Image: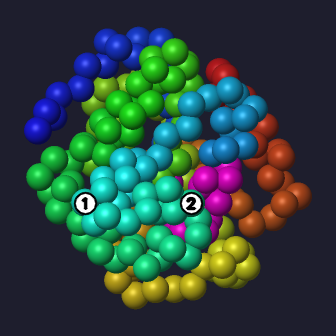
Amino acid sequence: MNTSFDKSKYSNVKKILLLSGKRKSGKDYIGEKLAEQLQAVLLHLSEPLKLEYARINQINGEQLLDSSSYKENYRKDMIRWGEEKRNEDPSIFCRLAIEQKHEMCSLNPIWIICDIRRYTDIDFFQKYFSDRLLLVRIEASIDKRKMRGWIFTSNIDDSESECQLDKNVQWTFVFSNNDSDSFHEQMNNLIEMINS
């Protein structure tokens, strides 16, 4: 397996946002809104994981990519499988997410990665793009997450994939996704930071 990464292909990149947060905190929603406003490329580290898992298990990969209940049927096993792959190669899904959208990434100066979950995800981007990174934590209360359909699931919500980045990370920006009144103000502040 090729574990190298050629960052020279992406010399045009000016900013990379790494979004982190719990399930149903609004990572995808905020990532999509930022991508629309900034005309940025949106990447999901989970996309190559889900598509490869689906291929191996002969299930519907497209349904694993959306927020339907379909993926919940496979989530625990997908996490286990993804951990095995990461143990073999910690940056595998970072590289694959970029490679899958190589053309868009090579042309676009702003990347938004919606779903970083581990220190190794941050390490990969710091290794290659440290001077262009913004680490953004999306936070939402348990009540708000429940309103969005979140239900605590043992061995998922208390697993490393959900909890590792809860500590020991210096976030560039913390986005409180609870109160709609400050949503636009926070978006504007974040966009200003991205454009600086």
Position of 109 compared to 90: left or right? right
Position of 195 compared to 76: left or right? right
Q: Which of 135 and 124 is in front in this view?
A: 124
- Quarter of the figure with residue 3: top left
* Location of residue 125 in the rendering, given as x and y in whole percent from the top left corner: 35, 35
Residue 49 can be seen, yes or no: no
Position of 24 compared to 70: left or right? right
At x 58%, y 65%, the residue is: 67
At x 28%, y 66%, the residue is: 57
Extent of the magenta region: 20-30
At x 31%, y 46%, the residue is: 93
The 10 Å Cα crowd at callout 1, few under 14, some 14 to 19, many 20 or more, is few
Tell me which numbered mark, 2 or 1, is placed earlier along the sequence.
1
Q: Residue under label 1, please give it.
A: 56
Tell me the element at label 1.
helix
Q: Which of marks 2 and 1 is in front?
A: 1
* Location of residue 48 in the rendering, given as x and y in whole percent from the top left corner: 36, 48
Q: Residue 66 carries which label?
A: 2
* Location of residue 173 in the rendering, given as x and y in whole percent from the top left corner: 59, 45
